[in-house]
Image (spheres, helix red, strand yellow):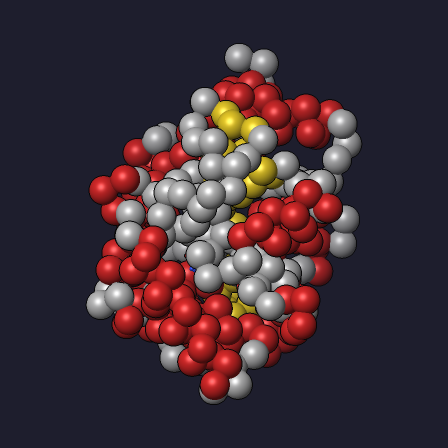
Amino acid sequence: MTPAGARSLPVEVHPEVSAALAAGKPVVALESSIIAQGMPYPVNVETARQVEAAVREQGAVPATIALLDGKIRVGLDEEALVRLGTDPKAVKVAQRDIARTLVTRAAGGTTVSATAAIARLVGIRVFATGGIGGVHRGAAQHFDISADLPAVAQAGVTVVCSGAKAFLDLAGTLELLETLSVPVIGYRVPEFPSFYSRESGLVLEHVAQSAEEIAQQMIYQDALGFPQGMIVANPIPEAAAVDRGVIEAAIAQAIREAEERGITGKAVTPFILARIKDITGGESLEANVALVVNNARVAADIAAAYARLSQGA
Ligand code: PSU
Ligand code: MN
């Protein structure tokens, strides 16, 4: 499983995760930028625990990925989780920041792009997050497009998410995913969800009704020799969804404030998420927790189906 040259790479895979991978048992990768930058303490750490529990309940092994002390860690213990969730100096690690953060030895929360690249490296095929990054509104002027999209196009990892984050240009995000040949599949819904809400008005061409269908599609993607991963769009549970009018007003205000303050680059997403949370009085944060946990559950089902099918069972 270790790729060539990886001996010089400081990677520490938790024994439970490496045992599961060696035995062909289902493993779900989880990102950690959502812990370090995406949610405030203590909700971040509590959510991370809940997400791991949800993966276990479905019979898979959770592997939260982060950078600590100059090492890539795959599968975090409680101490590492709390450190990441409380370290005020923790950095946001996208794919291009991985090597640099190994050099500086900073604590790092990995985004979708970094997590997908690391999952690929250690052989984890399914991954859960809240919402992927994507094309920002106004990208034609400022070119802000998340590194998540090209990373998913290269990493061969199936990402279960509630669509892309609602403050993005969702139609533009879907267009770019098409250009990158990344399949986008609605999980039992015909529409691309908009993170805090189940609808976006954007119809998806492909809808899967079961985890098995998605696992079978992964196997065919592999057999075709395609490097692309897939996006499984799983909407927020009905009871946790936020009214779209409320969210859109909060988003408009948050984007305006980000522009006024000249926030750019990787600071944009954490800033906007935090402002939406404050403007909605915490309602968006509750929704974010609910959808992440739900995505973890579906990711575990897909990982289990993939493990079964790839063993010919
Ligand atoms: N989804 C959430 N909360 C988050 C993120 C996603 O519910 O904090 C993070 C993910 O780590 C994602 C990143 O990869 O935001 C995207 O950042 P950017 O837009 O800077 O690429
Ligand atoms: Mn960006």
Residue at (26, 56) in percent of width and height: 286
Asked if residue 217 lies left or right of residue 274, the reply is: right
From the viewer's perspective, is 60 left or right of 308? left
The structure residue drawn at horizontal position 43% and vertical position 38%, both measured from the top left corner, is 234
Q: Residue farthest to the bottom?
A: 261
Count of numbered tags: 0
Give 295 or 85, whichever is nearer the viewer. Answer: 295
x then y, percent, for residue 296: 39, 41
Q: Is residue 190 above or below residue 28?
A: above
Whether residue 255 appears in this view of the structure is yes
Judged from this view, the residue extending furthest toward the top is 313
Tell me if residue 102 comes above or below residue 118 in the rendering: below
Q: State the residue at coordinates (34%, 67%).
A: 250
Q: Residue at x 76, y 54 (%)?
A: 5
Relative to 153, say whether 259 is above or below: below
Can residue 82 be seen at all in this image of the molecule? no
Name which quarter of the figure residue 245 lies in: bottom left
**x, y percentage for residue 297?**
37, 36
- Image coordinates of residue 39 in percent, x first then y, are 35, 65
Q: Position of residue 29 (x, y in %)?
A: 49, 46
Location of the N terminus by quadrant is top right
